Image (spheres, helix red, strand yellow):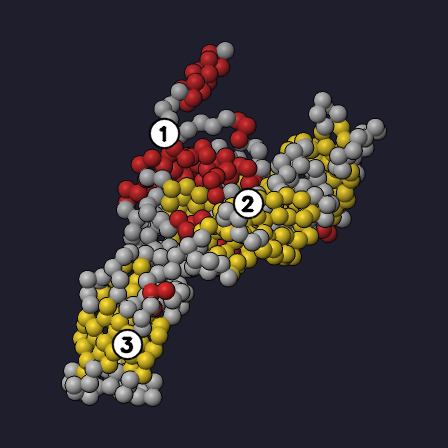
């Protein structure tokens, strides 16, 4: 009796330890999982010794609840340095004391951050780890990095994902979010973490739960759902050579608790839709579902003997409300005579055609365009400048249903053009350029000309220069013979109409280009502006 009391006191003392030593996790986490966890730890010189020790302590707490060994969870540690170093393999530790001691003995490598080489090594380790296993067990790679110069990781990470490895990342520095969000396995919100090294313990539970969700022995989950379909995944996955079939069934749950068939009709006998899948299947897509409907799905082995490998799993989900196109219409690329109209979502299997009607407000002529159902944008041309249009996009569905949405679109006004351009030769290969424009809305001037200093006289090099709106002249030197000089006004949205002259560098000859009424000429946008060119001798 006394021995039992002593043991109880000791056990109570363990549970009362402060949380900053070793967290005690609920027993439900101990035997829930089976799979491989490979830790990819940044051990390069960009990580301070303090940060490295905090990362090791974080990993110690992260792995503490798992039962280790074959049939449970296997954990390995791979360090990233100039050359990758395998600290311990997946089969190295089958007890928590052994794993915790190995983490405490881990020393930092320093050197460069050669993550790409480490990933190649990780790929081989994880491939060999599953060889010979009867069940295809889940594999997880957890990458801990300070975010400094991770290198070309997209390729190796993509190969790991294709091989079924789930990728999670923790960044303790100013990592490149675009790179990290590309390489991790969705969902990003539970598989990618940015955290200060001093606060890293706050993500321990969330990261552990994300790992548990990936390596839980038996689970059926909905990974994607829409108004008419759902994608389901499950574990474990049986190998095809075991010759197991999986019996799959699902039915809708109608308001009031009654059951129905997937087509939405009543089911007097409570029948289920059944699908038979091969034993190595890991996912299925259910199609033809009804929108805004609750469904139940069950995954069941097709014989009693197969229950040794997989118990019946069930999941309940609700399809999304139906969204008919067009649900959104946007206007872009506006110019004086054109505007691009886009709409969505694209529903090629259900929409036969789109009809676009547009006319100038308040009472302009209405024009109509008909497009195939696979298109989701069109360019409207021949419009009047500085005019407001009403644009209506209508979808005609194969069921006969129609839906329309209207927006207002405005074309740009015509931008004032350059009024005058004058070239005065100054010496042998230079000219003084003078011009005159209009001040309203002007942001500056854009000059282009051909230089004479080039390796290929037959193909003179081109130069350009931007000048502020107050500049009305400049000196150009080292011009090519008969160099073409162009000046265009620049406004907030685009370039205006420009003028060009071909320079003749004869002393005393003045070249002028002046086009009365040029301000009324239409502008064609900043990337392809128009100019009037005069060749003067």
Q: Which residue is mark 1?
A: 21
| Label ID, residue 406 | 2
**Label 1 residue SS:** loop
Q: Residue furthest right?
A: 269
Decide: few, some or many residues near mark 2? Use Cα within 10 Å; few <14, some 14-19, many ≥20.
some
The quadrant of the picture occupied by the C terminus is bottom left
- Residue 239 is situated, as x and y percent measured from the top left of the image, at 69, 49
Sequence-first tag of 2 and 3: 2
Left/right of residue 151 with respect to residue 278 in the rendered view? left
Left/right of residue 474 with respect to residue 307 in the rendered view? left
Sequence-first tag of 1 and 3: 1
Q: Is residue 271 above or below residue 148?
A: above
Q: Nearer the viewer, residue 316 or 171?
A: 316
Q: Is residue 132 above or below residue 53?
A: below
Q: Which residue is mark 3?
A: 513
- Report the Cα–Cα distance between label 2 and label 3: 46 Å
Q: Are marks 1 and 3 in contact (CB under 8 Å)?
A: no
- Residue 105 is situated, as x and y percent measured from the top left of the image, at 36, 43
Res. 528 image quadrant: bottom left
Decide: few, some or many residues near mark 3? Use Cα within 10 Å; few <14, some 14-19, many ≥20.
some
Left/right of residue 412 with respect to residue 362 in the rendered view? left
Q: Nearer the viewer, mark 2 or mark 1?
A: 2
Q: Residue at x 52, y 59 (%)?
A: 379
């Amino acid at each position: 009796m006394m021995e039992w009391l002593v043991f109880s006191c000791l056990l109570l003392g363990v549970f009362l330890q402060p949380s900053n030593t070793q967290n005690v996790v609920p027993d439900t986490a101990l035997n829930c999982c089976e799979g491989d966890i490979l830790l990819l730890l940044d051990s390069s010189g960009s990580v301070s010794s303090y940060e490295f020790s905090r990362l090791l302590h974080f990993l110690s707490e992260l792995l503490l609840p798992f039962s280790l060994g074959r049939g449970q969870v296997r954990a390995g540690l791979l360090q990233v340095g100039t050359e990758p170093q395998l600290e311990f393999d997946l089969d190295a530790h089958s007890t928590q004391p052994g794993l915790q001691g190995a983490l405490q003995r881990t020393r930092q490598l320093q050197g460069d951050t050669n993550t790409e080489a480490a990933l190649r090594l990780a790929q081989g380790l994880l491939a060999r780890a599953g060889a010979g296993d009867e069940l295809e067990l889940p594999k997880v790679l957890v990458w801990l990095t300070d975010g400094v110069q991770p290198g070309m990781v997209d390729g190796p990470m993509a190969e790991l994902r294709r091989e079924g490895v789930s990728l999670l990342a923790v960044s303790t520095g100013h990592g490149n979010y675009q790179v990290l969000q590309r390489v991790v396995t969705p969902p990003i919100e539970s598989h990618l973490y940015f955290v200060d090294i001093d606060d890293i313990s706050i993500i321990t539970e969330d990261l552990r739960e994300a790992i548990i969700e990936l390596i839980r022995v038996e689970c059926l989950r909905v990974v994607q759902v829409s108004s008419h379909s759902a994608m389901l995944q499950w574990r474990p996955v049986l190998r095809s050579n075991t010759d197991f079939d999986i019996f799959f069934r699902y039915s809708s749950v109608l308001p009031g608790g009654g059951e129905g068939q997937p087509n939405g009709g009543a089911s007097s006998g409570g029948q289920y839709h059944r699908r038979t899948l091969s034993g190595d299947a890991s996912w299925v897509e259910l199609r033809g579902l009804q929108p805004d409907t609750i469904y139940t799905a069950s995954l069941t082995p097709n014989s009693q003997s197969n229950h040794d490998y997989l118990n019946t799993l069930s999941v309940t989900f609700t399809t999304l409300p139906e969204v008919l196109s067009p649900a959104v219409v946007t206007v872009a690329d506006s110019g004086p005579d054109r505007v691009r109209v886009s709409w969505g979502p694209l529903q090629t299997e259900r929409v036969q055609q789109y009809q676009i009607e547009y006319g100038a407000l308040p009472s302009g002529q209405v024009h109509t365009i008909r497009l195939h159902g696979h298109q989701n944008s069109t360019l409207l041309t021949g419009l009047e400048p500085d005019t407001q249009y009403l644009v209506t996009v209508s979808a005609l569905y194969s069921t006969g249903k129609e839906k329309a949405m209207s927006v207002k679109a405005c074309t740009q006004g015509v931008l004032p053009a350059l009024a005058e351009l004058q070239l005065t030769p100054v010496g042998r290969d230079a000219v003084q350029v003078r011009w005159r424009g209009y001040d309203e809305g002007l942001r500056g001037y854009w000059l282009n000309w051909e230089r004479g200093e080039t390796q290929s006289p037959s193909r003179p090099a081109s130069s350009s220069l931007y000048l502020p709106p107050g500049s009305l002249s400049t000196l150009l030197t080292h011009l090519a013979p008969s160099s073409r000089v162009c000046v265009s006004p620049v406004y907030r949205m685009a370039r205006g109409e420009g003028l060009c002259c071909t320079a003749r560098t004869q002393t005393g000859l003045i070249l002028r280009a002046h086009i009365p009424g040029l301000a009324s000429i239409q502008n064609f946008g900043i990337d392809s502006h128009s100019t009037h060119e005069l060749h003067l001798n």
